[in-house]
Amino acid sequence: MATLEKPEMPILRETADQIYQRIANRMAVIAKERGETPPATEEGELFYDLLYPLAEEISDQQQLFEYGFLQRFLPWAEGEYLDANGVFFGLGRHKDEADISYKQRLIDRARTEDGDGRRADYERWARNTEGVGGAVAVEKARHDNSIDVYITNLSGQPAAAELVQQVRTKLEDNRKALHDLNVFPAKVFPISISVRLVVQPEVEVAKVKEQITTLIKAYLKGRSLIVYQQLGALFFVDGVSDFTEYTLNGEKANLTVPADSVSTLSLVVSV
């Protein structure tokens, strides 16, 4: 999932000082129109004591309004607001599922329509099963319409037999075409990335790592060829000016993920 920057909403981000200054300016204009002397509005004056707390309250309400406004949109929704988006799309959150993975499933659902049993449909249906972390569908050549689906659990490990059977049952209920369908525990293809970031002062490294992790996971999803240079470009999130010592599985070269495997990510970031 590509990172979407929150829109700039300067009118909704005023400080109490900015709001109070606008009020003071209006008072001065009114006084001049009446031919009166503008009232004293500096700190410690009567109007300051009366109106500055009001300016603070308006500033706080602006921030709350902005937060509520952005929660209406799926890319920025979180918590209970994200669950509300799930109700709209008819896709519930798995037990203990984090916002980041739930949001990605909802965005995938929003970008696609229910299909009639193509490879991407099987992958989406499998990932929407409780307990499934990753899924890869492979069209086999042994005969027409044959598809194998390989799945992992929420920890990125090969799925247990019980989970495999649950997915098999769900896919059987969903499929609309007469495919020869099989579900297997996925083989795990570990991808280890190590990088040293050059960050701007006061940047939260943990937040930067979270953003980069989200971008990389979106890039890896369903991809067989992992291009070293393309992956490196994903390090440039807000607050990162450069990077060095970048390796992909210990090398500086492309990787190929086997068709029956699901990528798992290990990201080591240093500054």
Image (cartoon, rainbow, N blue to C red):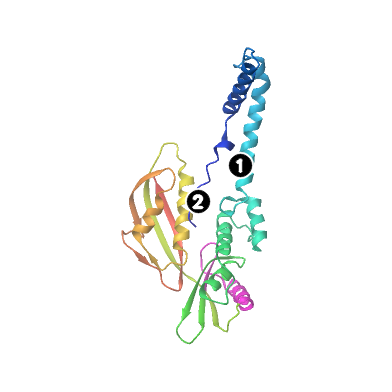
Residue 255 marker: none
Which residue is found at the position 43% from the left and 73% from the top? 259
Q: Is residue 111 found inside the magenta-colored segment of the image?
A: no
Q: Of the residues shown, which amino acid type is indicated by label 2?
A: Leu
Residue 4 marker: 2
Q: Is residue 110 above or below residue 12?
A: below
Q: Is residue 151 found inside the magenta-colored segment of the image?
A: yes
Q: Is residue 116 left or right of residue 142?
A: right
Q: Which residues are magenta?
A: 150-174
Q: Is residue 165 above or below residue 17?
A: below
| SS for callout 1 | helix
Crowding around mark 2 (Cα neighbors within 10 Å: few <14, some 14 to 19, many 20+) is few
Q: Is residue 230 left or right of residue 41?
A: left
- The answer to which of 247 and 12 lies nearer the viewer is 12
Name which of mark 1 and mark 2 comes first in the sequence.
2
User: Distance of mark 1 from mark 2, alpha carbons?
Assistant: 16 Å
Which quarter of the figure is the C terminus placed in?
A: top left
Q: Would you name the residue on which mark 1 appears?
A: 66
Q: Quadrant of residue 51?
A: top right
Asked if residue 271 shows in the view, the reply is: no
Q: Of the residues shown, which amino acid type is indicated by label 1?
A: Glu
Q: Is residue 16 above or below residue 93?
A: above
Q: Position of residue 25 (x, y in %)?
A: 59, 22
- The answer to which of 1 and 256 lies nearer the viewer is 1
Q: Is residue 142 left or right of residue 101?
A: left
Which residue is found at the position 38% from the left and 46% from the top? 197
| SS for callout 2 | loop
Crowding around mark 1 (Cα neighbors within 10 Å: few <14, some 14 to 19, many 20+) is some
Q: Position of residue 63 (x, y in %)?
A: 61, 38
